[in-house]
Image (tube, helix red, strand yellow):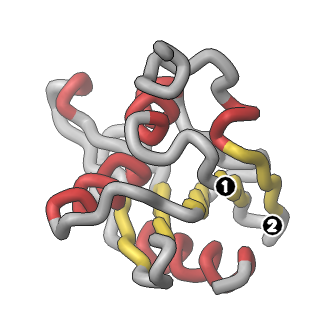
């Protein structure tokens, strides 16, 4: 799947977001090496710490289905700026695929693509602990 197709899937996933507090829907589309795509959206909670981001939702769905390595993830946010993953999501993603591509998109149809390693160069993971 190319970057624009993956972004379109992430944008659709954002339609399922539960965001009564921030009103900021985010969607993610996670592509596995075999081409399977898992989607996620952010799900907020009145106890803010219990909120889960779209990226972690997609990754948890994939991990629960037996996937452990990922090729790329597209993150779409309803905003003018690029929707980059938060620090907690970067750490979570680094557990599985430190070299994966992260595509951060905005509502204007623009996107920015970097490797997770570029976004979080000194992640706490098994690769960096050797």
Q: Up-down: is 65 above or below 128?
A: below
| Front in this rendered view, residue 60 or 17 | 60
Res. 103 visible in picture: yes
| Front in this rendered view, residue 64 or 103 | 64
Q: Which residue is mark 1?
A: 101
> Alpha-carbon distance for marks 2 and 1?
21 Å
Do residues under tags 2 and 1 come within 8 Å of each other at their CB atoms?
Answer: no
Q: Which residue is mark 2?
A: 108
Residue 128 drawn at (x, y percent): 54, 19
The 10 Å Cα crowd at callout 1, few under 14, some 14 to 19, many 20 or more, is: many
The 10 Å Cα crowd at callout 2, few under 14, some 14 to 19, many 20 or more, is: few
User: Is 19 placed left or right of 49 in the picture?
Assistant: right
Res. 19 visible in picture: no
Quadrant hosting residue 17:
bottom left
Q: Residue at 41%, 82% (x, y): give it.
A: 36
Which mark lies nearer to you, 2 or 1?
Answer: 1
| Front in this rendered view, residue 2 or 80 | 2
Quadrant hosting residue 96:
top left
Quadrant hosting residue 3:
bottom right
- Tell which residue pokes out farthest to the front in this image: 130
């Amino acid at each position: 799947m190319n970057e624009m197709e993956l972004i379109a899937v992430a944008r659709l996933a954002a339609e399922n977001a539960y965001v009564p507090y921030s009103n900021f829907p985010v969607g993610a589309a996670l592509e596995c090496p075999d081409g399977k795509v898992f989607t996620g959206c952010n799900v907020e909670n009145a106890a803010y710490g219990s909120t889960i981001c779209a990226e972690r939702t997609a990754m948890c769905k994939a991990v629960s289905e037996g996937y452990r390595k990922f090729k790329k993830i597209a993150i779409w946010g309803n905003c003018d700026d690029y929707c980059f993953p938060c620090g907690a999501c970067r750490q979570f993603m680094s557990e599985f695929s430190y070299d994966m591509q992260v595509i951060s998109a905005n509502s204007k149809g623009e996107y920015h693509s970097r490797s997770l390693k570029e976004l979080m160069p000194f992640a706490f993971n098994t690769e960096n602990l050797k």
